[in-house]
Amino acid sequence: MKNAFIDLLKIIARADPKSLLVRVVTIILNSTIPPVTTFLLGKTVLSLTNANLEKTILLSVCYIIVVFLWNFYLRYSGVVNARLNDRLVIKLREHMIDLHQTIPQDIVESSDFIHLRKRGNDFLTTYALRFFGSAERLVTIILTLLNYCIIFCGIHPLFILIVLCASLPGLLCRAKFVPEMRRMYEELQEDRNYQGYYKKMLTNPSALKELRVWGLEKTFYASYQELTAKIHRRQTNHYYRHGFVGGGVESLAFGAGVIGSILLGIRLTASGIILIDGFVMVVSSILDVQDTFISAYYNILGYRESSYYAKDYLQIYHMANDSERGSRTASVSLPPGELLSLRNVSFQYPLGGRMALEDVSVDIGCGEKIAVVGENGSGKTTFCKILLGLYQPSGGKVEYRSGLAASVTFQDFCRYHLSVKDNIVLGNVSLEGDQESGILKAMEISGFDEVCRTSGLTLNSMLGTVAGEGVNLSGGEWQRLAIARCFYDNSKNLIVLDEPHASLDPKAEVKMYEYYGNIIECEKKCLIFVTHRLTSAQMCDRILVFRKGRLVEDGSHMELLDRKGYYYEMYTTQSQNYITQEV
């Protein structure tokens, strides 16, 4: 926990040193002013008792100024803290975004990192302010208690003992009830999950339509109400015990501490052991000291709990700093007509993952139209991500021609909630010249121009649901738009399409393949398709067949059929299924 606090302190110090300085000043003020006020009040009463008018006036003026400034500070400290907290979360979020830019793509996509990122986001959303707030208050409490200890030691050490004894019952009550509350929340977690599930089912449009068809609204609503009542009863019982029993014990102990301090102060003052200023200081501060002492327990618990989430955030931080890996990709002078070359390339997913590619060697030439086929999990998409430089090979090497520029449409493409024009221009925001002609050509290639004609969309039409008047497209229409974005920049000489026609009907697919063939012949671009439809693969010049991470076959459609190997088996099986469906 100590290392977590120091690491996060370093991050904040680099990201926002001014806010950190303001927090340090705030801690000093919060821990110093209350004891100073108590000290001035005691000395003022002492000088008044001694009939020292000049000193009384001076001390009274100092006391009034300090109290006025303290009250002025308290009125505006909430605004200052709110601003500091906002800046803190903003800086940490920006830092998280920066970290994601440096972590390799294969790690970002791993399931372990996805869970880690979720916990890191939980820290930013819920626990960051609790972590820093608890740490800040703990430092303030320690300094405050030290200041009061100095004052009490100067009066009489017995007062420190009284404070400790009076605070002990409250600490024991909190030590009993707070863990009970944590256990209660853990035991109710499953009920809370189901409560949230029923609530989501009753409010989610997709789920609600099925509930209405089957007449399940009342059933689900009754289950939601039953769980809500169960959770409420359990929490009410705990809060009753904690509030009335624990609070009662704590109040009695506090009262005993105050009474004991006053009685001891009266006796010591009457005996001449302490002066009247010491008595006033003790009486005016004893409750504040006891409350400060006990509040340390809550802040320690809050700090400990939030520190676990802080460690997740810091694990991402250290992962980004330790992610430097030797590149196995290089720009070299390849033979004429050759664009890319893979030699004995292997790839293993990070954090103990499986081997996705093993000993893959292949040359890819300019102007080729290549299909990449295979079963799910055979390594097709991983192969394309290595070609694009998103993944670094675990073994072997990738060589590419100088000047290689790639464009891609992934199967899980992004749906940008922007205008039609902006969606396509994102293919290269720095491209200069006549944007509109390039946009229209890309829309023609992908068939999105037909979507615009039938739907009445213009280049300035907003898409998606973020904008109030945005148009939500179908899956196939979004995919055509993604393909248009891929073809917007005409300077790209390598185009990778991962399942580009998964949401398109067969007629639209055939039309797009005609466009692709014309593009290759005219502009000598290399197109690589990842597809499950072997009828589409046969339109390509060359087919790469993957199986369990290995490149098992390489050739044209007719060549692979003549070999009667793995491709032949897949093609025959798929063709028979199509015939059966047609019958």
Image (cartoon, rainbow, N blue to C red):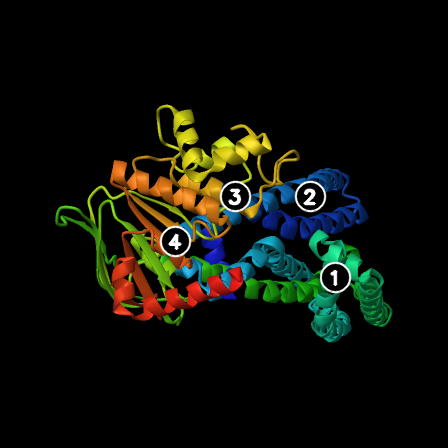
> Closer to the N terminus: mark 2 or mark 4?
2
Rendered image quadrant of residue 514: top left
> Closer to the N terminus: mark 3 or mark 1?
1
> Closer to the N terminus: mark 2 or mark 1?
2
Few, some or many residues within 10 Å of mark 4 (<14, 14–19, 20+): some
The residue carrying mark 2 is 78
Q: Which mark is residue 340?
A: none
Do the CB atoms of the residues marked 3 and 1 lie less than 8 Å apart?
Answer: no
Q: Which mark is residue 291?
A: 1
- Tag 3: residue type? Trp
Rendered image quadrant of residue 483: top left
The residue carrying mark 4 is 536
> Closer to the N terminus: mark 3 or mark 2?
2
Asked which secondary structure carries label 1, the reply is helix
- Tag 4: residue type? Ser
The residue carrying mark 3 is 478
Residue occupying the far top of the picture: 434
Residue in the image at 78% along x and 58% along y: 213
Locate residue 361, reporting x and y percent: 22, 63
Q: Nearer the viewer, residue 223 or 212?
A: 212
